[in-house]
Amino acid sequence: MYIAPRPRSADDPNFPIRLGLTVVAGFLAMAWLQPTLAPICVALPIGLIAGLRKAFDPARAIGGAVAFAVVVWLMAGIVAITRHVPAAMLLVMFMFYFVGFYFTRRTGSAFGMLLLIAASLMSIVGMKNPVMLNIFRDGFLLGCGVAAVTIPTLYLLVPAKTKEKHVDAPRAAAGHHGGGALIRAVVLTGLCFWLYAVLPVSDMILAIAAVFPLIFPTQDEAFAEAAERSWATLIGGIVALVVLALYGFSAHFEVLLVLMFTVGWGFGVAMMRGRMSASVYQFGLSVAAVLVATALTTSNPEVAMVQRVFLTLIGTLGASIAVAVLDWLLLAPASHEDGYSPHPAIQRKKFNREYDI
């Protein structure tokens, strides 16, 4: 799957400021709208704007939010129709998982990931609790709406320096697209079935975390992604605990906004200059913001952090091991002749640098 290069100060020196303001906007929206799933109003705008590069592009900035909203709405409807026959729902979800993985492997586009995340989320919630299905659907639609308003506004207030729009440069995965997609669909379906049948809905992060390493075509990339996701969750959790500790000295909402702007700005700088992949800091910021937002309405943030780190580690590592074994047993090794890899960690390992396109 194509991953955007690091944001560059030459193109967009205001990137960290805009990211910090996005976090603030999310918390303001959460306080104003009082949604049932408050953290989504914070996490979705962060995830969407952090993936943008160079000048404002309406098609990408607004189109991403609209596309995710449409996919979530469709998946919720399909789950609502099929959940009464679990075997049918499982088969339908397997088909969507296969299509998502195949599309990404065939084109390199990130749209397949949107489909996989939406299908996993809606099916797990819908199988467990049909009332929660509607709550999650509406929560994500609201989060997409907040993102669609926030992102253009912040680009208008804090524009990029360059006028050039970023153009993605995805490449198809090497090897057998259908075989690789089938293996990953089987692994994700098995994990989701475990959640349907045994685990509580609060453990859904297991399946969502698994999607990220599974989306990559090789075992080296999958394990690299699993390691980076786990580090990001740990970093984000520690930052959240520090923010909550500081907030405890002066529990005013204005203080929290200043703290979260600082966190967003700091992660934005790290995305541009940090030693690890930019996606580590992007995901770390999302984790920190979600944990802080959750702590405002619940207790025991320490327990929430430990649980999230544990579930992320199990989900990413378990999925990576399962795919590595099945790929080894069923597929011939394949790679691009020029050594191309979409994952920044593998790029640094092979070429001592990351791609800049």
Image: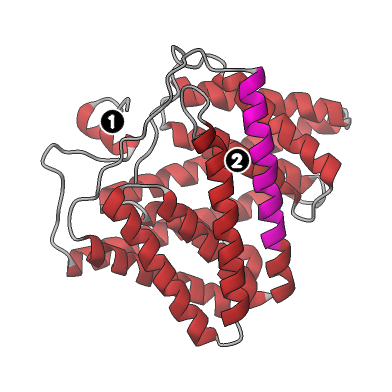
Query: In the image, which residues are magenta?
Result: 136-157
The correct choice, above or below, for 196 with respect to 97 in the image is below
Q: Earlier in the sequence, mark 2 or mark 1?
A: 2
**Label 2 sits on residue:** 286
Q: Main secondary structure of the magenta part?
A: helix
Residue at 61 percent across and 86 percent down: it is: 84
Choose between 168 and 185: the one closer to the eye: 168
Residue at 68 percent across and 68 percent down: it is: 133
Q: Is residue 53 left or right of residue 34?
A: left
Choose between 264 and 7: the one closer to the eye: 7
Number of the label disc, if any, that sits on residue 348? 1
Q: Is residue 263 visible?
A: no
Task: Mark 2: give few (<14), some (14-19) or many (20+) Cα within 10 Å.
Answer: many
Q: Is residue 344 visible?
A: yes
Choose between 233 and 29: the one closer to the eye: 29
Mark 2 → mark 1, Cα distance in angstroms: 24 Å
